[in-house]
Image: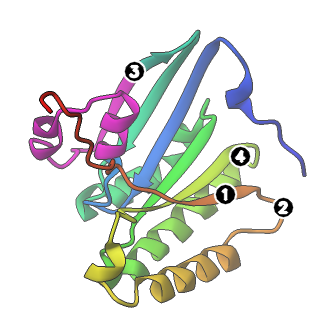
Amino acid sequence: MMRSNKFQNNGGLRKIILLGLDNAGKSSIVLTLKGDRSLLSYYSLNPTKDHKITNMEIGKTQINIWDFGGQETYRDDHLKKMDEYVEGANKIIYVIDVQDYQRYDRALAYFQRALELIIDHRTDIDFSIFLHKYDPNINHQIPTIDEKVESVIKKIKEMIPSDIQYRIFKTTIHTTFEKIPVFL
């Protein structure tokens, strides 16, 4: 089953849904997409309650990002209304915090439940899985992170039906420190 990449079209409205457990970094991803470079914005983030819709414009395209709170109190409600939420959606991004390896099973279980509900209603949505917080020097923080992430990737591939196209990315919001000489 081949699908076109809806994001290559110029103009129009695009709806992106961000799902994942609490503290996976979904709201930080939204800030980064908006181009917010203020560290204070990231430090002052609070957990998303229910869901938050952020509107932005890139070129001639209006983008609505639906950031769903990942706290346990909201996840079941999100799943119950998933058919409503995916209506009109062009892309689903599921975010897994790779540094929170103790909750991989919980993140994958939520992914599986959401995936089943989404594909019951729609099979034409672009799926991406962000293995997030794959930050610089992460191997020094968690020596076996690459092995753990490979295991997660294998499990994701086993969960997704073969007729559903998806992509998996290692992501980070960190940029490299830059220094510009002003006095020599």
User: Colour mode?
Assistant: rainbow
Viewer-closest of 69 and 42: 42
Residue nearest the observer in this picture, 97 or 175: 175
- The CA span between labels 3 and 4 is 23 Å
Q: Is residue 51 covered in magenta?
A: yes
At numbered mark 2, what does the secondary structure look like: helix, strand or loop?
loop
Foreground: disc 2 or disc 1: 1
- Tag on residue 167? 1
User: For the residues marked 4 and 1, what is the alpha-carbon distance in whole angstroms?
Assistant: 17 Å
Crowding at mark 4 (Cα within 10 Å: few <14, some 14-19, many 20+): some
Q: Earlier in the sequence, mark 1 or mark 3?
A: 3
Q: Is residue 176 left or right of residue 17?
A: left
> Which residue is identified by label 2?
163
Span highlighted in magenta in the image: 27-55
Between discs 2 and 4, the one toward the N terminus: 4
User: Which mark's residue is nearer the viewer, 1 or 3?
Assistant: 1
Outermost front residue: 184
Residue drawn at (20%, 33%) of the image: 181
| Residue bearing mark 3 | 55
Q: Label 1, label 3: how many angstroms apart (C-alpha)?
A: 24 Å
**Who comes first in sequence, dot 4 or dot 1?**
4
CA distance separating discs 2 and 1: 13 Å
* Camera-side mark, 3 or 4: 3
Mark 2 or mark 4, which is nearer to you?
Answer: 2
Q: Residue at x 69, y 15 (%)?
A: 10
Looking at the picture, which amino acid does disc 3 mark? Asn
**Chain-order first, disc 3 or disc 2:** 3
Which residue does the numbered mark 4 point to in the structure image?
122
